[in-house]
Image: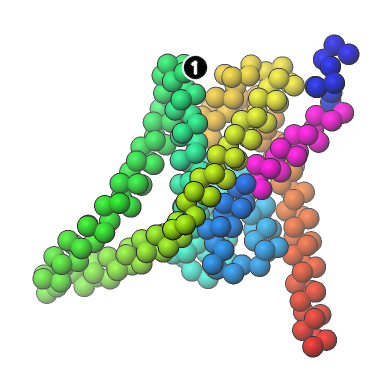
């Protein structure tokens, strides 16, 4: 056995499937913690997660996130809640990714990729906007009230109130949860890096370089052989998961209706 039992094809794919399951368990728990107050039935939420993740893997450049926003806007019956929930999920995912990429690239390459700088800038701007918004709101609200006779002042006040409602919603969501959201984000990315490392070794690809290239390809047009294999595996896995969770969702719905009729 030249490759040894460690790389045996007999158990490699099931092992990767278990790790992949852990990755998406961490991600779905993170999103569930964000939308938990909306009382979405768990099996329905599970199906929504699997379906939107499948679309995200198929559609390039993370454009599938727009579909996820659409799905959760319908699930929560609120554009604001659906949009902010997905945006917050992306934020914590990006924070963990940046904190992994920055030291990895600096230590391994000595330089930081443009996509990493872009993601870092997104995190910094988002944190600054969140921290600065109360002061911005107080100043602008006072200014608009004093000049409410001016053209467009009333519309601006309504827009400002909508922004404050969104801010309060985000503040309520992350209060007491940000540590868990960050932990699950790190868990997901570290497990994903482990999967990529194992797949690189199993298929004879260049480990570190391809892993880094895959992570960069998430926000760029560059593709690697490792990325193609990982995405293909993910599509098959999530397609099966979507079908299974849809079936469980239907069974749960029928069970509830049967119980109501008997009552």
Q: Name which residue lies at 79% across and 74% down.
A: 254
Q: Is residue 151 visible?
A: no
Please identify the dominant SS of the magenta region. helix
Q: Is residue 201 left or right of residue 62?
A: right
Q: Quadrant of the C terminus?
A: bottom right
**Vertical relation: 248 (above or below) 124:** below
**In the image, residue 223 lies at what x, y percent?**
58, 27
Q: Which residue in the structure is indicated by mark 1?
A: 108
Q: Name which residue lies at 62% across and 46% down.
A: 26
Seen from the viewer's position, the closer of residues 208 and 70 is 208
Q: Is residue 5 visible?
A: yes
**In the image, residue 242 lies at what x, y percent?**
73, 53
**Vertical relation: 113 (above or below) 126:** above
Seen from the viewer's position, the closer of residues 240 and 16 is 16
Residues rendered magenta in the picture: 10-25
Q: Is residue 129 left or right of residue 87?
A: left
**Vertical relation: 80 (above or below) 256:** above
Q: Quadrant of the N terminus?
A: top right
Q: Is residue 199 left or right of residue 13?
A: left
Secondary structure found at label 1: helix
Seen from the viewer's position, the closer of residues 179 and 160 is 179
Location of residue 145 (image quadrant)? bottom left
Q: Is residue 9 left or right of residue 50?
A: right
Is 160 part of what is drawn in magenta?
A: no
Q: Name which residue lies at 65% across and 29% down.
A: 194
């Amino acid at each position: 056995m030249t490759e040894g039992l460690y790389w045996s094809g007999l158990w490699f794919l099931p092992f990767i499937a278990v790790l992949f399951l852990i990755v998406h368990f961490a991600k779905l728990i993170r999103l569930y913690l964000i939308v938990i107050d909306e009382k979405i039935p768990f099996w329905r939420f599970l199906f929504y997660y699997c379906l939107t993740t499948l679309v995200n893997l198929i559609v390039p450049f993370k454009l599938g996130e727009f579909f996820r926003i659409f799905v959760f806007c319908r699930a929560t019956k609120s554009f604001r809640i659906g949009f902010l929930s997905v945006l917050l999920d992306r934020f914590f995912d990006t924070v963990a990714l940046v904190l992994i990429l920055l030291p990895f690239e600096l230590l391994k390459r000595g330089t930081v990729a443009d996509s990493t700088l872009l993601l870092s800038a997104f995190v910094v701007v988002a944190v600054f906007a969140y921290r600065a918004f109360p002061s911005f709101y107080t100043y602008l609200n006072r200014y608009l009230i004093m000049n409410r006779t001016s053209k467009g002042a009333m519309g601006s006040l309504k827009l400002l109130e909508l922004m404050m409602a969104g801010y309060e919603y985000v503040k309520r969501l992350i209060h007491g949860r940000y540590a868990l959201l960050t932990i699950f984000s790190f868990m997901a990315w570290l497990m994903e890096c482990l999967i990529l490392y194992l797949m690189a070794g199993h298929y004879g690809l260049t480990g570190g370089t391809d892993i880094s290239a895959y992570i960069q390809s998430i926000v760029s047009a560059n593709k690697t052989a490792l990325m193609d294999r990982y995405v293909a595996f993910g599509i098959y896995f999530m397609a099966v998961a979507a079908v299974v969770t849809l079936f469980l969702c239907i069974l749960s719905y029928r069970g509830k209706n049967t119980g109501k009729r008997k009552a």
